[in-house]
Image (tube, rainbow, N blue to C red):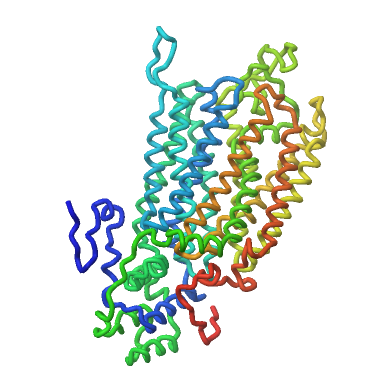
Amino acid sequence: MASTARDGVPERSIFHRMFWPEDQTAYSAGFSRDQDFERAITAILNRTDHKKTPFKWRVYWVAALGFLTDSYNLFASNVVLPALSSLYWNTPSRSNIIGFNVATLIGSIIGQIFFGIAVDICMRSLYGFELMIVIVSTLGLLQCSSGYYDTASDQYTWSITGWLFFWRVVMGIGIGAEYPLSACIASEWSAKHSRARMLAAVFLMQPLGQLLAYIVGLIAIGQLGGSAADIDRFWRIVIGIGAAPTILALFARRLIPESWRFTYFVVKNPGKAKLDARNVYDRASIVAEPHELQQLGDRHESPTLQHDSVVDVIVEHDPPERQVSEPAPVWRPGSQFEWAEFSKFLWEYRARLLGMSSCWFLLDIAFYGMGFNSPGTLAKLWTDRPINFDRDAPYWQKNSDVYYPLVNGTFLNGTSGLVAAPAIKEVLTSTMKHAIYTTSIAAILGSSFYIGFAHMINRRHMLIGTFFALSVLLAITAGAFKALYHDGDANGSPISGGHVVLIFLWALIQLFFSFGPNTLTFVMPAEVFPTKYRCTCYGFAAASGKLGAVLVQAVGWATTSDTSDPNDYKQLQYMLAAFSVCMALGGAIALYEPCVPNVQHGFENKSLEEASNEQAVVRETPKHDDQS
C-alpha cells in the first residue's frame, strides 16, 4: 500500500515502526536552530560533563549486561570444548576444536563490521537486536543433534559438527555486534569526568563473564556424573544458561532512549535530543551554576534563578513565536555514507582508524593466542612433570594434566607401558579450576585496578607503557620457559617448583593485559571518532582485533601436528617470543600521536566532542573553575 504523507514527511513502514517506534521527525516542532538554541545545547553539554554529574548507573547496567553475556558466550567455548571433543571428535585431531573457535571469531568479525555500520545508519535504537541473535543462536546450539542413526548405511542423517559450527557463527555475529554498541552507548551517555571509568567498568564484564562461565561449568559438572549422557547434558547446560543474562539485558535495553548526541549531531533534531537528555539526565543530575541559568534566562528576557536545571530553562523558555520559525529537518538515514562525504572523513581520520585497528590487531594476536582454546596450554603450565599418553589418545586427553588412571598403552615413541587415561569429568574440572586461578582472577584484578586509577592515568601514556611492559614480560617468560617448564627436568623429577613461577608469570601477563591494552583498546576507539561514524570506526577497529585472533589460531594449527608431543615446550616458547614482538610493535604505533591521539588534558578527560574533533557545535568554555 502506498504511503501517505503527513506535513511533507513520508509515512514510515511497518518494519521501521516495529524496531524504531518513536517518530524522529515529530519532535523538532517548536525548536528552531538559531543561536540561542545552539547555546542551550552547549549548556547541556557543559552541565552533563560537569564534575558534579553523578555516574549514570542506569546507562552502565544497560551496556554492561549486554557485554557480560557477550563475554560469557564467547569464552564458554573454553569450558565446553573438552566435552564436545570427547563426545563428537574423540580422535587425536584438533581440527574441529580450532574450527569451533574460528567459527565464533569469524561471526564476531561480521557482527562488528555490519552492526557498526548499521547503527550509524539506523540510529542507536538498533541496540538490542544483536541480543535477539544471541538468544536464537543459543537455542539453536541447544538443539544440535546428529539426527537418526541408519544402521544399514552406518551413518547419521545430520552432521552435528556442521550445525555446531553454523550456530557458533550466528552467535559470533551477535557477540561481535555488542562491541561497538555497548562501547558507543556508554561513551555517548557518560559525563566527561566519568567516561573512562564507565567504559572500563563495562569492559570489566569480559573477565567477569569468563569467570561466570567457569563457575557455572564447575557447578554443573559437580552435579553430574561422568557418563556420555551426563557430559552431553553438561555442555548444553553451560551454553543454555548463557541465554539468561541475555534476556535480562534485552529488557534493560528498553530503559534507555536514543543517544541524544546522535539525535543532535547526526539527525539534527534538537527537540528530540532535548527530551532524551532530560529523560536520562534529570534535574538531580544536571545541576547548573546560577550564573549559567541567569545567562540563558537573560537571552529569553525571563528570570531563571528559580530553576535548577538547564533543561528546564530550554523547556520553559522557548517562545511561542519561534515554534513555527522554520520546518523540522528531515534526516535521511545513511546520508553520511555518501561517497563524497565518507571518503573525506576516511582521509581526515585515516591515521586514527589505522592506529586503533593496528593496536587492537596486535593485542588480540597475543591475548587470544594465550587465552582462547586455553585448556591444553594451561595444562602444560600446571604440570610439574612430563605425562605419557597413548599415541592414539584423543586430543582432549593429551592436553590434560590429569595423571590417572593408568592403563596399558603405547607411548608416542612406539614403546609400550602404563599410560595416563584421564576421565573426561576430571579433565573438565581441572581445566576450569586452572583457568580461574591463572586467567580470570588476574584479569578481574587488572580491570579493577584500571577503574580505580582511571582518573589518575593518562590513557595514551598508559597504553604505550603497558604495551612495552607486556613485551618485556613476554620476553622474560619466553627466555625462562625451558628452565621452568616441568620444573626444568625432562626426566620427570621435580626441581624447586619452577612451574609455579611459570604460572605466576602467566597470571601477571593476564593482569597487565586487563590493566592496559585489553581495556584501553576497548575504551579509546569509542572516544576518538565523531558521532556519525563512531560505531562504524569502532566496528572496524574491533574486527581488526578478531582478525588477529583468527590469524593466531590459523598459525597455531599450521605449525603443529596432531601427533605432536604434548610435552614439547618449544612451540609455546616461540609463541611467547612472537607475542613479545607484537606488543613492542603496538607500543611503537601508540607512540605516534596521529594514530593514537591524546584524549585528555594531562589527567583530565577532554569532552567527547573535543576528543573526536566533533565540529557540529562550537562549545563555550565556562568562565568559572569547576570544583567537585
Quadrant where the image shows the C terminus: bottom right
Residue in front for this viewpoint, 306 or 258:
258
Q: Position of residue 417 (x, y in %)?
A: 72, 12
Residue 68 appears in view: no
Residue 226 on image: x %, y %: 52, 23
Does residue 405 lie above or below 518 as drawn? above
Question: Taking 462 as reference, is 173 left or right?
Answer: left
Along the viewing direction, whichever of 30 and 312 lies nearer the viewer: 30
- Please name whichever residue, 539 or 158, is drawn nearer the observer in this view of the structure: 539
Above or below, 118 relative to 284: above
Residue at the image position 59 percent from the left and 42 percent from the top: 549
Q: Nearer the viewer, residue 189 or 450?
A: 189
When the figure is inspected, residue 445 is found, relative to residue 233, above or below; the finding is below
- Is 159 situated above or below 300? above
In the image as oriented, which residue stretches furthest toward the front?
340
* Left or right of residue 93: residue 6: left
Q: Residue placed at 27% from the left, 58% from the top?
A: 21
Q: Residue at x 65, y 42 (%)?
A: 438
Query: Splitting the image into 4 quarters, where does residue 432 fall?
Result: top right
Image coordinates of residue 564 in percent, x first then y, are 70, 24
> Measured from the top left, where is residue 592 in percent x and y?
68, 62
Residue 546 seen anywhere in this rendered image of the structure:
yes
State the count of labels: 0
Q: Residue furthest top?
A: 152
Q: Identify the residue at image location x=59%, y=28%.
A: 427
